Amino acid sequence: MTRFINSLTSCFLAFTLYLTVISCTKPTPEFNQNHNNITIDPYIDSLLTPIVNQIYQSYELPGLVLGIVKEQEIVYSKALGYKNLDTQEPLDINDIFHMASVSKPFVASAVMQLVELGKVDLDTPVVHYLPYFSLQGEGSKDITIRQMLTHTSGMPDVEDYQWDNPVYTEDALKNYVRSISSEQLIGLPGERFAYSNMAFECLGAVIGKISGVSFAEYQQKHILEAAGMIESTFLKPLHLPNEWAVPHNRMTISVPWHGYPYNRMHGPSSTLHSNVPEMCNWAITNMNRGVFRNNQVLKPESYESLWHPWFEIDENSHVGLSWFLGSYRGENTVGHSGGDIGFSTNFIMVPEKSIAVVVMCNQSAAPVEEITNLALDIMLGFDPAPPLVPASIPVSQELYLNGLPTAVALWDSLKSFHSEKFDFDPQHFSGLTVALYLDRIEEAESLARLCVNIFPEEVTNYLKDRTEAYLKVNPDNQSGAAIIQILEQESPR
């Protein structure tokens, strides 16, 4: 009993300290904000910056950058935190981030350039342009360019990106597309929406084959430079440049990852690297229907295809040619998000209002969508409301610092006395599978024991199912069996 009381006392002290940290005026690092002649709108700054600072601190993020465009001008930019928590090197809005799946609309733009030149027809089968393209299953030879761009090709998704064994050579993409011939279709082409990174690697190979240059080279010359994205690239040097953000992952606490989510074979789906000002230039280009300054990247009529709702995902969203079409506060939106191990990104436009927001964080599973929505609220005239903080953040930190009993006690305390301030969704414990991926077995087992003790049986079964799904993709991970055993056999309180 004495041990429990001591643990509970420790828990309340930890929580008191946590609330003090996130509510005080602790200085947040902000550096070199006013580059590229950006003039910050003081009204936006006064409303948004305090909330962004609060989110940055309460979510314990390593680094965060964002930008807002209004009427073809960058009206707000912000960089908070660090490129690398180990070195404490501050972030700048010009620093480069891995953009993950935000890469895909760039593929669509390149394809539409080739359509404008009469070199590609969206409804022609891919094998016409790429004779070596092949998959197993009925209809594989009939898959069209349009179906690949709209995620209706019936192709599966990539299961292993081999971030731990990257290929940097120019032939990596072509070799990858040749290697998928044994993959099985998961549905008939055109039948249903099924997100497929694999399809976008194939589209990158099509672009390379038709243009006669590599996919990355085509993007650099015909898309990125034309859209004012001079520092952006689909290529990563062997050694990480100083001005590039370092990836981080949160398990019990956020830590730098000494690997990196890069492999040239997955360039089209995932490896755009860019910064705030240049992603704002991309927004300006698209909201101006393909024109950046005096450069015409695309013809205006191409947007009739790019932003057409080709396939319904659900009652609130459709997919265009790689772009996702939805609504926010009654306004039509066009955008794409991204997430790879170590990074989270979001890019969204409200074309009718000439508004765009880009948010990037050098940590996986970061609240980039929530920050995007706050920015949109302010730009659209609504009162911004900060999101609830995941309870997993202070509780996982308590687990790391003081162990299981006080972490469980803190969880109980938050649910009993502060439920209006925290989000208790079990999905926030994604650090469990991240720890498995990074072979941090001690942290994975610790998180598994925490989940067994704070969640009812149906939730631990959900986490078990997620772990088993991970192990199907990564069967060589020996530590996963220990996690399954904990989730199956260790009794809750």
Image: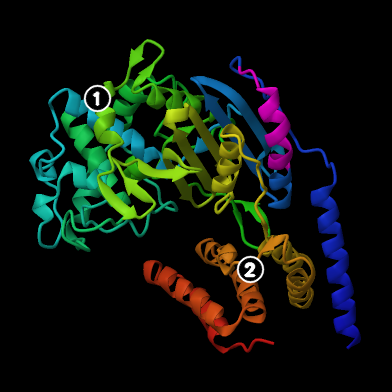
Query: Residue 454 at x, y = what percent?
Result: 66, 78
Alpha carbons under labels 1 and 2: distance apart: 52 Å
In the rendered view of the protein, which quadrant contains the N terminus?
Answer: bottom right
Looking at the picture, tell me which residue is in the foreground, 88 or 431. Answer: 431
The residue under the point 58% across, 48% down is 370
Q: Which amino acid does label 1 sit on?
A: Glu
Residue 38's place in the image compared with 369, above or below, is above
Residue 175 showing in the rendered view: no
Say whether residue 482 is left or right of residue 35: left
Spot occupied by residue 441 in the image (x, y as percentages of width and height): 58, 70
Query: Residue at 18% across / 54% down in the picture?
Result: 190
Residue, x 33% and y 31% (percent of image)? 216
Residue 205 in picture, x, y percent from top left: 22, 39
Query: In this view of the protein, can residue 330 be seen by the observer?
Result: yes
Label 2 sits on residue:
443
Which quarter of the figure has residue 188? bottom left
Q: Which amino acid does label 2 sit on?
A: Glu
Q: Is residue 189 magenta?
A: no
Helix, strand, or loop for circle 2? helix
